[in-house]
Image (cartoon, coloured by chain):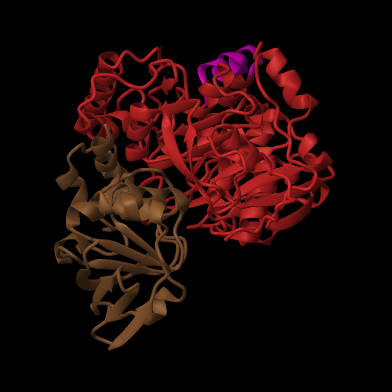
Chain colours: A red, B brown
Amino acid sequence: MNLLTENSGKTIAEKILSDHSSNKSVSPGEFIEADIDLVMVHEQLGGRIHKEYEKLGLDKVWDTEKIFFILDHWVPAPSIEAAKMHQDCRKFAKKYKFKHDLGMDKGICHQVLTELGFAKPGMLIVGSDSHTTTYGALNCFSTGIGATDVSVVFATGKLWFMIPETQKFFLEGQLREKIMSKDLILQIIGDISTGGAEYKSIEFHGDGAKSLSIDSRMTVSNMVVEAGAKSGIFIPDNNLVEWLKGRSISNYKLTMPDDNAAYTEEFNYNLSKIVPVVAKPSSPDNVVPVSELPEIKIDQAFLGSCTNGRLEDLRQAAQILKNKKIYRDVRLIVIPASKEIYLNAIKEGLIEIFLNSNAIVGNPTCGPCFGGHLGVLGPDEVCISTTNRNFIGRMGDVSSKIYLASPTTTAASALKGKIVDPREV
Amino acid sequence: MKEIKGKVFLFGDDINTDDIVPHQYLNLRDDNEITKHTLENIRPNFAEFVREGDVIVAGKNFGSGSSREEAVNVLKTLGIKAVIAESFARIYFRNLVNLGILAIKLKKAKEQFSEGDNIIITLDNGEIINQTKDIRIPIEKIPDFLLKILESGGILNKIKKSK
């Protein structure tokens, strides 16, 4: 299907993909082979990747500098099986002389990768994790791939892509107090459904997009995959340039879409109309305003993950929890997404607020989000969570239930023992 | 590709990768052990019923969620040769192709098959024959680019040949 006419301009995804391929006039539906700037791998390296790669019988990888390797899902190892997996990962990284072995003390892959300046505007990045879309907030084309694809990149530095169609999301207005970008992206997923952006790239435009902090944008780009999107890219602006400057990141290429770029669909959102929402079990598109929920009692609240474990998230939650105690029958688990965030949260007194509210603060890890460790749910338990998926059994027992929400809604609900609108506490 | 002949296992919409491989088996490190648990949360004992050549038919958004390739590899290990769905999640689609499993996008797929139907897929003729229902269903041509990967038996075999 070729929806572009010869005169159409290019979207950001089309530009970045064609910049990385020998085919300079790409259009949606075409297959290309593109040069990869960076590949991120985590514990999957010790899962299927190392086994698949060894089948190729190669004694090196294409570029030891373009591989970012970190352990984040099961850290520190909660079981002998996880420890063995970590051993396999380390062995492989040493054997193939990876230059960027980040170890397991730094935090969650997507957060650490962006903090350390590995993602720059205009880059084509892939990773062994579906939430690799996060770097779209930094104007990258980034997307998740499986173990075999990672092996292909290790061997050749190239990967096949089908050029995606692009959806334009025009955002205006500003989010109101205690409403977060999580509410926006959940609302979008609820509106367009889990398949609403299938195989497509999303572009975020407008003053509303500009009004979002980089932390907030990362939450949005992170979760576009829950609508099936291949990437979710923000138009570059001064906020981004300042953020990059603050981290001494240079040598990048800001990529704007052409004025006459062709979009398959356009959606408009006024951020001032967004309200606190949750995604009910067991799909991220099962979205309703908190105000329309019946009384939902909770056993656990989780604040963290690559979706919502950033400093801004911790700050907003701490504001709600300050000088208060969580409800006696609720466990609140707080996990900063990285060591850098953890240290800043200590400096700002946020960790003290969480501990004094009777929350449990864990080390940076993906842990509870995928039912790995540090907060696995038991039979019939209900959890409100700032994470990205509420599939059946995702965080523990198959009968447990997950409501996805923003950090403010999660913190407020932990105080009340039931799901509440953060504006009511 | 030669023809595929097998029995249909029918599933609904939005079957995700946590359904296909529940998280607690992800670090087992042994393909056969992981495979025993395929789809067990939503279809207990599924792995015991599958025979070489069988086919999964599903609704929209098959394979949504995580990039865990185990969720394709368990099907491959069980001998499943094709997945027919109304639509696929992107990463899952890639993983199917890369591991050499035929992914067929078909409108109203769920309505054209029942659990246990005997079917034959022939790419040369571009059709699926549902022997049980005695109907022939035309399918869209698989792009040559993807067909070459499938015919190599997966993308790593294709790379091995070119190295």
| Residue B1 or residue A130, whichever sits in front | B1
* Residue A50 seen in render: yes
Q: Is residue A21 above or below residue B65?
A: above
Name the side, left or right, on which A249 lies relative to A49: right
Q: Is residue A176 magenta?
A: no
Residue A360 % position (x, y): 48, 28
Image vertical order of residue A283 relative to residue A145, above or below: below
Which residues are drawn in magenta? A337-349
Q: Nearer the viewer, residue A137 or A151?
A: A151
| The N terminus of chain A lies in quadrant | bottom right
- Give the image location of residue A369, x and y in percent: 45, 39
User: Could you tell me which quadrant the C terminus of chain A lies in?
Assistant: top right
Q: Residue at x 60, y 45 (%)?
A: A26
Residue A344 within the segment the image draws in magenta = yes
Give how far across and how far down residue A57 sits, in percent: 20, 27
Residue shown at 46% from the left, 51% from the top = B90
Q: Give the image quarter of residue A42.
A: top left
Residue A21's x, y, as percent? 53, 35
Furthest-bottom residue in view? B134
Q: Quadrant of residue A414?
A: top right
Magenta span: predominant SS is helix
Q: Nearer the viewer, residue B32 or A298?
A: B32
Task: Choose top left, top right, bottom left or bottom right for residue A133.
Answer: top right
Q: Nearer the viewer, residue A322 or B69?
A: B69
> Is residue B72 depicted above or below A301 in this figure?
below
Numbered disc total = 0
Q: Is residue A336 visible to the viewer in this orientation of the structure?
A: no
